[in-house]
Image: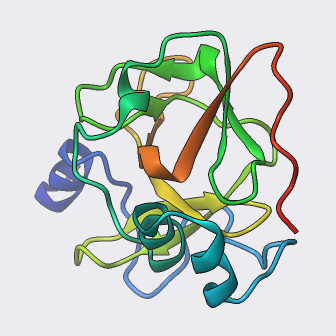
Amino acid sequence: MDRRQSLFSLLGLSMLPFGRGAAAAEASKPALVKAKTDWAKLLPPAAYHVLFEEGTERAGSSPLNGEKRDGAFVCAACFLPLFDSSTKYESGTGWPSFWQPLPGAVATKTDFKMLLPRTEYHCARCGGHQGHVFNDGPKPTGKRYCNNGVALQFVPRGEKLPELRT
């Protein structure tokens, strides 16, 4: 392992060639497409900024960090279930973190906003930005899906999921 690979590993990043796609599947077109102005009318400003302008909320600001009940974490835009509460863990980052999404719930793409490549993930249904996935999570996956809390809603087990926004 060379110095560059060591640095990437310490930062929880995979070695990806610049200008090429991530090792994970690249994001495909979402099934639910709306104009950004339509999403802006439906969502609080902070949620809209994160979900559709790919913003980031301040670390430690989400009440979902402390959510420990049994249930599902759903996309705040379209209400697609993204994570089961059994995969949530305390990562110490200040954002809700999960070691695995639900099957087919997220799509990924490579993000170069911080200069080094990172794997960004979005809701597979509406394309809303959720966060980034890193390779420093717990077993069994070794992944840390670091999510913006304003991009999620929690639904306790047994409660009905919100209706799909169309």
Residue at x-position 37% and y-position 27%: 65
Residue that sits furthest to the left in the current view: 3
The C terminus sits in image quarter: bottom right
Can residue 138 be seen in the rendering of this structure? yes
Residue 18 or residue 31, whichever sits in front: 31
Q: Is residue 142 left or right of residue 6?
A: right
- What is the x, y in percent for residue 1? 23, 49
Can residue 23 be seen in the rendering of this structure? no
Residue at x-position 68% and y-position 64%: 25
Q: Is residue 98 left or right of residue 32?
A: left
Residue 165 or residue 147, whichever sits in front: 165
Q: Compared to 97, does 7 lie above or below?
A: below
Q: Choose top left, top right, bottom left or bottom right for residue 147.
A: top left
Q: Compared to 135, does 142 lie above or below?
A: above
Residue 94 or residue 116, whichever sits in front: 94
Q: Choose top left, top right, bottom left or bottom right for residue 146.
A: top left
Residue at x-position 40% and y-position 40%: 135
- Across the whole image, how many numbered discs are drawn on residues? 0
Q: Choose top left, top right, bottom left or bottom right for residue 27.
A: bottom right
Name the colour scheme: rainbow
- What is the x, y in percent for residue 47? 48, 61
Residue at x-position 25% and y-position 35%: 94
- What is the x, y in percent for residue 138? 43, 20
